[in-house]
Image (tube, grey):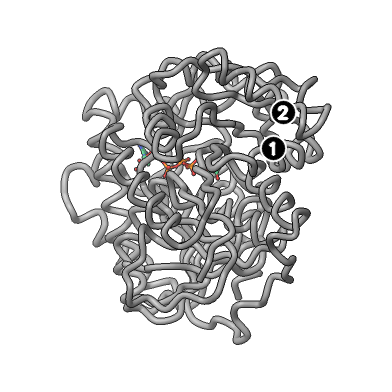
């Protein structure tokens, strides 16, 4: 297999979001969980998105895993590798986007790497280097209260400069609007001024097309799904890839119980749970009990087992920002996150053991923990449920055929869970 595009995603929901965009644009795409083993039979594809769970871990380990994935993708022919980060640039000042960028840039032999988290379809735009979530600057959006990566600065030139060893410049919207050649020229100028990265403005899809065409002149780019859209259109426009219809990945309906697990505390997920509660049973886990023993997870499984032959069930640890911060002050942020992720993963395994084959997971870290526990090696892409969230069909793994949806915390409208279940039926 010779890949036209290699992608590395820093979390699993982000990976499925990007894979969805590439498939929608006509690239035959699969999502792998980490670097697949040699014995996993993969179909002929144009793009592979390697999903990692490195968004919130220390930089040295993140760098090592991203570099290994980059080598694997390039050995399979990928000339261009995109590193997928969150469209809300989730990271802390100690975060690892900068160090990963520095090391992938050195490996690729590039000077100035184009970086843009813009994804206009979900309201993420970048202007003068400032990231907006809908109408709000990043630091005034719900991301200011994120449990793991609270974002307090909307200016990405500053945010990335605090993380990267190199200087960071800006390709502003006026330049982007002039097209790919103008972007390439600006990148060359930023390179000669000693910049290692360039935050690039984008507000409309046409901006992303120019950005994609310019990025393809280099071997590495960094961004969210909007950049993926630009790269995909650039590859097709250049004739490197032929546009393919997204193929239906499962013909037979998926019978049997369905379940939803939510570990995301993002505002959209909280609203989706509240809405779903009107039509299906919801078990709200007590995070304090999860932290103090294993009984709560077992009780959750018993609760689900009593109901799931009749109705989909939701099991959620999600709480509001005040409760999250109270718990983190008491037990420590990382400890709380990890224990809850492990508990939800154990519940997922128990549910699948009891016959669940349709599973929806809300939250990137939570999805990572669940998919790792289920040991699913890869996914092909099914129908899009909402922007950024496709149906995923398992490839390989010990549980047989399953369909999953891995929902980024802030994606989807209020009725997301019912909508997803209807499509996954
Ligand atoms: N009640 C809670 N209190 C504190 N932390 C929680 C609680 N429930 C879940 N968590 C933790 O919060 C984190 C949520 O991160 P996760 O990535 O799953 O969701 P998200 O950030 O909303 O999604 P995404 O990364 O896709 O935007 C996880 O580590 C999870 O274990
Ligand atoms: O880019 C996004 O916002 C999402 O794909 C994501 O990465 C959330 O985890």
> Residue 51: which quarter of the image?
bottom left
How far across and down, in percent of the image, does residue 300 sit? Answer: 32, 60
Residue 113: x and y, percent? 54, 31
Which of 212/316 is in front?
A: 212
Looking at the image, can residue 329 be seen?
yes
Which image quarter has ligand 2?
top right
Gap in Å between the C-alphas at discs 1 and 2?
A: 6 Å
Q: Which residue lies furthest to the bottom in this view?
A: 252
The quarter of the picture where the C terminus appears is bottom right
From the viewer's perspective, tell me whether residue 70 is left or right of residue 269.
Answer: left
Please tell me how crowded label 1 is: few (under 14), some (14-19), or many (20+) other residues with Cα within 10 Å.
Answer: many
Question: Would you say residue 270 is visible in this rendering?
Answer: no
Image point (54%, 70%), residue name: 380
Q: Is mark 1 on a helix, strand or loop?
A: helix
Residue 46: quadrant of the picture: bottom right
What residue is rendered at 61% in x and 32% in y?
116
**In the figure, is residue 62 to the left or right of 27?**
left
How many numbered tags mark residues here? 2
Q: Determine the residue positioned at 44% across, 28% down.
A: 321
Residue at the spot 65% in from the left edge and 69% down from the top edge: 423
Percent x, y of residue 10: 43, 44
Circle 2 Cα neighbour tier, 10 Å, few/some/many (<14 / 14–19 / ≥20):
many
Residue at the disc numbered 2 = 183
Above or below for 360 versus 320 = below
Residue 214 circle label: 1
Question: Pointer 1 and pointer 2: residues touching (CB < 8 Å)?
Answer: yes
């Amino acid at each position: 297999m010779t890949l036209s595009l290699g992608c590395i995603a820093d979390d699993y929901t982000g990976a499925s979001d990007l894979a969805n965009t590439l498939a929608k644009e006509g690239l035959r795409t699969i999502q792998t969980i980490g670097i697949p083993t040699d014995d996993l039979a993969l179909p002929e594809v144009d793009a592979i998105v390697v999903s990692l769970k490195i968004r919130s871990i220390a930089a040295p380990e993140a760098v090592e895993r991203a570099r290994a994935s980059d080598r694997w993708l390039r050995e399979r022919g990928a000339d261009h590798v995109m590193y997928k980060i969150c469209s809300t640039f989730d990271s802390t000042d100690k975060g690892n986007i900068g160090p990963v960028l520095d090391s992938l840039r050195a490996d690729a032999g590039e000077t100035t790497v184009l970086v843009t988290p813009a994804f206009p379809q979900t309201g993420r735009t970048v202007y003068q280097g400032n990231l907006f979530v809908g109408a709000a600057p990043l630091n005034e959006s719900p991301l200011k209260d994120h449990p793991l990566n609270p974002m307090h600065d909307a200016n990405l030139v500053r945010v990335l400069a605090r993380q990267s060893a190199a200087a960071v410049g800006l390709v502003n919207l006026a330049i982007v609007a002039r097209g790919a050649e103008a972007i390439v020229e600006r990148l060359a100028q930023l390179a000669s001024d000693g910049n290692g990265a360039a935050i690039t403005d984008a507000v409309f899809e046409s901006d992303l097309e120019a950005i994609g065409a310019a990025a393809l002149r280099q071997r590495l780019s960094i961004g969210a799904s909007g950049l993926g859209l630009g790269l995909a259109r650039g590859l097709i426009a250049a004739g490197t890839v032929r546009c393919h219809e997204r193929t239906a990945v499962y013909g037979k309906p998926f019978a049997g119980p369905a379940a939803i697990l939510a570990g995301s505390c993002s505002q959209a997920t909280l609203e989706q749970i509240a809405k779903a509660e009107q039509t299906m049973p919801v078990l709200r886990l007590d995070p304090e009990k999860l932290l103090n023993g294993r009984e709560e997870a077992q009780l959750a499984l018993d609760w689900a087992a009593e109901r799931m032959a009749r109705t989909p069930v939701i099991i959620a640890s999600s709480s509001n920002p005040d409760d999250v911060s109270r718990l983190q002050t008491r037990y420590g942020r990382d400890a709380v996150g990890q224990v809850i992720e492990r508990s939800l993963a154990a519940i997922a395994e128990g549910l699948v053991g009891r016959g669940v084959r349709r599973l929806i997971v809300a939250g990137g870290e939570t999805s990572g923990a669940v998919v790792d526990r289920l040991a699913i090696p890869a996914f092909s892409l099914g129908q899009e449920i909402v922007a950024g969230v496709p149906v995923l069909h398992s490839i390989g793994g010990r549980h047989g055929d399953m369909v999953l949806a891995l929902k980024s915390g802030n994606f989807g409208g209020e009725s997301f869970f019912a909508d997803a279940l209807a499509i996954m039926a």
